[in-house]
Amino acid sequence: MSKKHSHSSTVIGIDIGGTGIKGGIVDIETGDILGERYRIPTPTPSTPQAVAKVVKDIVEELMTREHAPSKKAPVGITFPAIISHGIARSAANVDQSWIDADVDKIFSEELGRDVQVMNDADAAGLAEARYGAGKDIKGTVLVITLGTGIGSAFIFNGKLVPNVELGHLEIDGVDAETKASASARARDDISWDEYAVRLQRYFSHVEFLFSPELFIIGGGISKRSEDYLPQLKLRTKIITAELKNNAGIVGGALQAAVHFKITK
Ligand code: BGC
């Protein structure tokens, strides 16, 4: 077989973030990323045209690789905003011109193939529920991603309830992500102990509202969990994401595979 043979159980996932756009080829059966991820910095300004061009470049690069899916296979894309029926309804950490943009149409036209677009934290949650730390957990699992903003995924009995925006809960009169995101910690240049105090306030409130079975922390900062997790006192078990920074790519690809009936 040629090196470029296509695989029916692989789907490309693209994770669009405030600083980088990352893609990978995902094995839908296992949730593994096959080969290296490919990353390009998010363009500034991050307008729809500029971002769509970068997404196209990433897909083109991945399509040259071993394990590339077929040319017609859909692409799963995650986006840091509320995505309702393919339309962006917010734009917290990307260019404001995305609000009310038909994200689905923009990417499918640019790529010339079907796409499935979803919220980035929802994608991470879906991936953790299927392949990672939330696998086989009954009841409510909340996946909270600590990054440029705070993203959240609400999973109930393994099913995603989409577009739950718990990063924007108003706590002590301010939008929670302005205090407790990873970027807020860096911006305010506070110690891990001081950051843990902010996380305690945040997670206590979310726990009170939802009484989940499990919290899963995602985002780049989950790698440093020993610096803040031991300080947190909660009733709910709290652990870090198993798929680490790959969860968005994997969840985006999974959602596309489910939507276009490549898998159940
Ligand atoms: C956005 C969410 C997003 C999260 C993480 C928040 O500011 O409102 O939609 O999931 O950032 O990127």
Image (cartoon, rainbow, N blue to C red):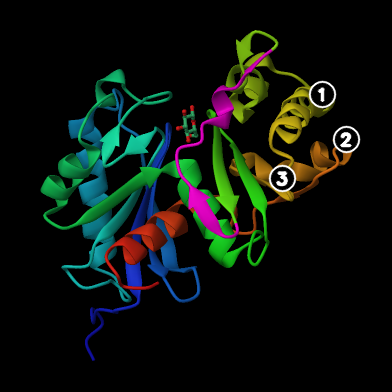
Measured Cα–Cα span from mark 1 to mark 2? 8 Å
Any mark on residue 66, and which? none
Residue at disc 3, CB closer than 8 Å to ligand 1: no
Q: Nearer the viewer, residue 43 or 28?
A: 28
Q: Are marks 1 and 2 in contact (CB under 8 Å)?
A: yes
Q: Residue visible at 56% across and 38% down?
A: 152
Quadrant of residue 47 within the rendered picture: top left
Q: Nearer the viewer, residue 62 or 105?
A: 105
Cα separation between marks 1 and 3: 20 Å
Q: Secondary structure at mark 3?
A: loop
Part of the protein shown in magenta: 157-171
Query: What amino acid is labelled 3 in the image?
Result: Pro
Q: Position of residue 24 (x, y in %)?
A: 38, 60
- Residue 197's disc is 1
Label 1 vs 3, first from the N-terminus = 1
- The mark that comes first in sequence, 3 or 2, is 3
Residue where numbered disc 2 is placed? 231
User: For residue 103, which quarter of the picture?
Assistant: top left
Q: Which residue is mark 3?
A: 212
Looking at numbered disc 2 in the image, what kind of residue is underneath it? Gln
Q: Is residue 165 magenta?
A: yes
Q: Amino acid at mark 1?
A: Val
- Vertically, is 131 above or below 245? below
Q: Residue at x 31, y 61 (%)?
A: 259
Report if residue 246 is visible in the image.
no
Quarter assignment of residue 255: bottom left
Expressed as whole percent of the image width and height from the top left, the position of residue 60 reads 21, 58
Element under label 1? helix
Identified at 75% across, 35% down, the residue is 207
